[in-house]
Amino acid sequence: MLDYSKLYDVIIIGGGPAGLSAAIYASRANLRVLVVEKDEFGGQIALTAKVENYPGVAPCSGRELADLMKKQAKDFGADLIYGKTGEISLEGTIKEVTVDDTVYQALSVILATGGIPGQAGFEGETEFKGSGVSYCATCDGPLFAGCPVYVVGGGPAAVEESVFLAEFSPQVTLVVREEDFTCEESISGQLKDYANIRVLFHTQIVSVSGEMTIEEVILTDNLTGRTWVERSDPDPEGLPDPIGVFVFVGYHPDTAWLPDGLKKDGAGCLLTDDRMRTSMPGVYAAGDVRQKELRQVVTAVSDGALAAVDLEPYVKKIHTDLNIPGLKKDGSDILSSMEGKAVLNLWLDDSDLAREMEEFLREKEELKDKVEIRIHREGRDDLILPSIEICSGDGVSSGIHFHAVPKGLEWNSFRIALFNVAGPGQKIRPEILNRIKGIDRKINFRILATLTCSKCPATVMAACQIAALNDHVTAEMFDIMHFGKLRFKYNVQSVPVTVINEDKLILGKMEVEDLLNEIGK
């Protein structure tokens, strides 16, 4: 049976350039479009410090380009949601896609799931993941300010991220296995402008080691066979500075979870024709997830446009065959769906961060009719300042605190937290809701994040959703770049870090169910 409120002409899984381009073209054709993104809209490009080769656009950050694409898609009426895609049924005329706890139906599906970072394979890489080894310079680079870092890879991503890291680190070592770079000279040529970047060709990292952090790196020269050890210099107290190792050795397609009926090549890339059609009717693939020669933003948006244009007549024929009326576009923002008004208690000190937080909230037009802001300049013994406390309309605290300016990638986390507190809130499976309601002891989540981390918002949203549903639970989001004491207390070298009741640390992205499982251990 069709549920028209949950039926879309096309569901696009993945909110990178390919997915957003498809959303723009499909929405302009007056189709009802849903785009599902599990991390952050913009995909890999949103983590790129500078984009110089996108036609017709002046050099800008990847985040700026991604935000423009996202705005275009929304302006044309596409529904954009954050969520984890679960069960997916692509056979038959009506497809079904489960996002978190909601089942959506679609007449067509575009798979634009992109890729997953590859591993370099050196000894200690897995053990130090999140404790010195990272796959995102934008997320974790600022945490290694003043420390030596190594970048593994010789492609455009490795070069560009080395340049980004050079703004924080006094010594960036680019370790390239090949005899030369595997990117255009126009990209690698920018390295000559950075005296603090050295390049080691035909070299590999053999291993990394240390106690709590990486303290030494063993390298080998593939031509001469020479192997040597490099260690970090001690700080004024005689302790070694932590070493950061950033790996950029390519991506493999995010397809392992997809149905077996979709044909793939040996590398797991989806096989398509020149119209982006996969082996299953009504199912398309676009961007890095498909087999192709050139993986660039410009080819990704081309794939998305081609898929959207080709599926339009396919979808309209289904409308005619099944007598489906034109599907109403929603395009509404989550704040416009709030049932009530929220109260924001701003607990402020005299810091620059406090002033920025107050200014940010007062200038947000989207909040004008949705929240009441109450300023408090007195201290609180039970609270780290500054803080934005989210309360229900009657002023009752939800236990949710943002110790940060909720901008950048955390703006959506903040909006959804408001939505969960003021109602109606995100839908949730009955069994998960029962587990949340069943928490009968005090639980405090501290999410240590940065505003540029693409993995942090999901963890923040999960903790806030639990707190909104249970009075025993509090959830605090900290921009760790402003809270040095917490950063050093918990030895934060990668984000997100979740601290539960001061004594349990968990690295990496967490969903609601993951946090509940950790509480139960």
Image (cartoon, grey):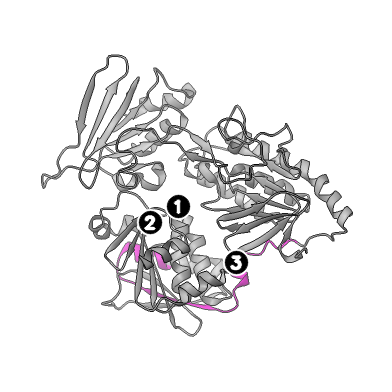
**Residue furthest out toward the top:** 224
Which comes before the other along the chain, label 2 or label 1? 2
Residues at badges 2 and 1 in contact (C-beta under 8 Å)? no
Write down the residue under mark 3.
Answer: 334
- Quadrant location of the N terminus in the rendered image: bottom right
Q: Where is residue 421 in the image (x, y as percent from the top left)?
A: 51, 75
Q: Which residue is drawn at 19% across and 37% down?
A: 232
Mark 2 or 1: in front is 1
Write down the residue under mark 2.
Answer: 449
Residue 56 in sight from this viewpoint: no
Residues at badges 2 and 3 in contact (C-beta under 8 Å)? no
Residue 34 in sight from this viewpoint: yes
Under tag 1, what secondary structure? loop
- Quadrant location of the C terminus in the rendered image: bottom left
Q: Quadrant of residue 255?
A: top right
Which comes before the other along the chain, label 3 or label 1? 3
Horizontal placement of 466 versus 216: left or right? right
Packing grade of label 3 (10 A; few <14, some 14-19, many >=20) is some
Residues at badges 3 and 1 in contact (C-beta under 8 Å)? no
Under tag 2, what secondary structure? strand
Under tag 3, what secondary structure? helix
Write down the residue under mark 1.
Answer: 455
**Residue furthest out toward the front:** 260
State how far apart marks 2 and 1 are (Cα).
9 Å
Q: Residue type at mark 3?
A: Ile
Q: Is residue 354 magenta?
A: yes
Q: Which of 164 and 314 is in front in this view?
A: 314
Vertically, is 179 above or below 398?
Answer: above
Q: Position of residue 59 (x, y in %)?
A: 52, 37
Q: Residue at x 37, y 33 (%)?
A: 121
Stretch in magenta: 329-358
Horizontal placement of 387 versus 216: left or right? right
